[in-house]
Amino acid sequence: MEKQWFTISVYSENNVGLLNRISGIFLKRHINIESLNVSKSEIDDVSKFTIVVNTTRKWVTNIVGQIEKQIEVIKAFYHTDDETIYQESALFKIDSALLFDERQIQNIIKDSNSQIVTVARDFFVLAKSGRRQEINEMYDQLKPFGIMQFVRSGRISVTKDEMQISAMLKEFQE
Amino acid sequence: METVKEKQKEKSTKSTIKISGAEAIIHCLLAEGVDLLYGYPGGAIMPVYDELYKFQDKLTHILTRHEQGATHAAQGYARVSGRVGVAMATSGPGATNLVTGLADAQIDSTPMVCITGQVPRHLLGSDAFQETDIIGISTPVTKWNYQITKASEIPEIMAKAFYIAKSGRPGPVLIDITKNAQFDEFEFAYEKCKGVRSYNPTPKPNTGAIEAAAELINNAKKPFIVWGQGVILGQAEAELTAVIEKAGIPAAWTIMGESAIPTSHPLNVGMVGMHGNYGPNVLTNECDLLIAIGMRFDDRVTGSLDTYAKQAKVIHFEIDPAEINKNVHADVAVLGNSKETLAHLLPMLHENNHEEWHNEFKKKHQIEFDEVIKNQIHPTKEGLTMGEVIEEINLASENKAVIVTDVGQHQMIACRYAKFEQSKSNITSGGLGTMGFALPAAIGAKQGAMDREVVAIIGDGGYQMTIQELGVIFQHQIPVKIVVLNNDHLGMVRQWQELFFDKRYASTIMVNPDFVKIAEGYHIESKRVSERKDLKATIQEMIASDKPYFLEVKVEKEGNVFPMIPSGASVSDIRLK
């Protein structure tokens, strides 16, 4: 079976230790987590994990089964890239002098659709949201001028399909 | 001794009734019907032990000689009684010593609640004396765990712990309680847990799936059932018996499912797996329908998955959705409690009798009997075999004993040759293969079924891993019968070295102490048998005794367990020698 990218979405209670429990499922199977994001979800008091892995369908099914088995997990799903709307965010910290000395920098900002978050005397910060590839391209363009700091977030995604978590929660309680 | 109820009566005189967290833990245990627990005290759990002292008329605490022993005793208790086993330990090393038992209970789906003390809340993360992150450590080997840092959390969390441990697919739960939460006082009220919103323990049976299963079974020419512990945990023994009898299906068991149906049942065709019976293994690859009930296709059962039952359709009756298609693809998956799903299935089945197919099992059994079994239970050669010891125990106990085994050759031989009439009678460490399991588990098994004979069968290696629990047997005069099958080797590893490592016996020869003298040191009646002529009478004497009894049997040093599916081979490539 071929490896491919999967986005695993986990709806759960917001409890101490659950992250450890979920990440342990990957550890036990020697599968690397490519990116991980934890946030609130569309339901009050329910957290959402968004986990990206590169693995086979057999293993992602196994992992999702094990995740869903955890007591505090309400529901877990996996999706391929074409089943989700997803993006990542990145911040670039760059020397302010470059804004004035290098004309190309301004073109990169315009062409990449990035935003200037702040400008200080010594540095300015660019924010860029989008697909991994777009962020990588911007990184490659800025790299020759010098990047003081760079950070990219984990993937966040929503599915094209409906997620009936509220209905499921209600059913559990009946 | 004051109880909460008595205290509540005084409510008119006092505005609030407050008890300490430590006392609350005792009331939670009592409310869950616990009257026996195993454990070991220490600094961070002392407030709870102080309450145990006050409540000793209601709650018996057995001091094991090592915390690992407490977990295995709790497991043994849980497995024979179907109740939740409880073990308690202090923080740090006390807690880490529980890990093997937790892992064993996790992989063998045993309901157990472990309670550990923890350093006070304000010292968490300070590397305080005997502080360890037992929540982090135990996470992968628990069904659920939780750290209580406030006394007021105790009732709800304890209720949840027992609910989670025993519902659905059972498993171990660890509750870690900081010392301040044991001391602090709060208003206690207990309510049993009836559900957790994010947890669906028992999936509702799907009628469509059961109908599809029935159709496959009714049309099968060579159907074959393999059942596992799910039948015992689901208390579905009668339902399974009714299904196999009505549809006339030969049925085999995994090691964890043994004893669910009597050994003597004509359709019970024996054990599957690495050292299982010849027929059920070979015929797994000849059946046209494999019906798996409450089992999880462990690698020791399936051998190579690439060649496992590829010719057959597969029906999987299972409570845990994560087990479906995990190892073996199920053409029909029937989720739910086996008692419920098999009861649904029964009326849909046609009465049948697959006599010709059943005869295939009988023929294979005859081959195995001639090649292997005969020489094990009626040996003509000089050295004592493990098999003949088991057979004498069968005879002396009239197949009524609970047999508790450790791990290795003696375990495989005991599971192969022990005969059972009653369910919940074979207690062994199946999934984890924990040497040292049997002696403490036998203590728990006896205390969970005081009216039954409990015989622990242990190798000389595993025995020495938890031998200190003889102290518990002596102190409480727990009448378990301990049989050490001594071959002065780590027999199973030695067997593998002989077969697969050109007889390089690396660290498998044991120079053993005088086991009889050790037992005598604990004032336990003990005997050693080295010759066949003494075996029967000594085993009869042991079974007849109403006290703890230790028996060492010197068995042949280089005996091997056959049949055997070499690791990674196909079930149909099982070797008879």
Image (cartoon, rainbow, N blue to C red):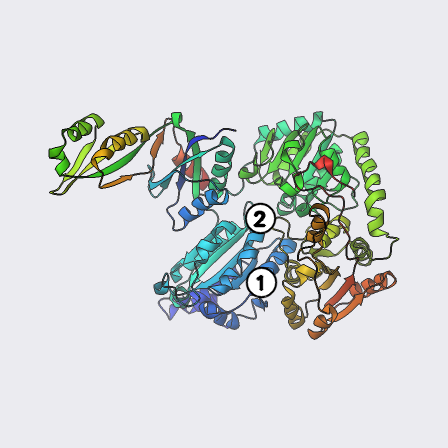
Determine which quarter of the picture holds residue B39. bottom right
Q: Position of residue B571 (x, y in %)?
A: 70, 37
Mark 2–mark 1 distance (CA, rounded to whole Å): 18 Å
Q: Type of residue at label 2? A: Ile
Residue B46 visible here: yes
Determine which quarter of the picture holds residue B178. bottom left
Q: Position of residue B262 (x, y in %)?
A: 75, 46
Q: Do badges 2 and 1 share one subunit?
A: yes
Toward the viewer: B135 or B336?
A: B135
- How packed is label 1: few (under 14 Cα within 10 Å), some, or many (20 or more)? many
Q: Is residue A128 left or right of residue B305?
A: left
Q: Is residue A173 left or right of residue A148?
A: right
Q: Dot 1: what SS? A: helix
Q: Dot 2: what SS? A: helix
Q: Type of residue at label 1? A: Ala
Label ID, residue B70: 1
Disc nearer the start of the sequence (2/1): 1
Residue in the image at 65% along x and 43% along y: B300
Toward the viewer: B279 or B510?
A: B510
Chain ID at mark 2: B
Residue in the image at 37% along x and 26% along y: A160
Q: Position of residue A16 (x, y in %)?
A: 38, 51
Q: Position of residue A97 (x, y in %)?
A: 12, 38
The residue carrying mark 2 is B107
Label ID, residue B193: none
Toward the viewer: B569 or B278?
A: B569
Pointers 2 and 1 in contact (C-beta within 8 Å): no
- How packed is label 2: few (under 14 Cα within 10 Å), some, or many (20 or more)? some
Against B452, is A169 above or below?
Answer: above
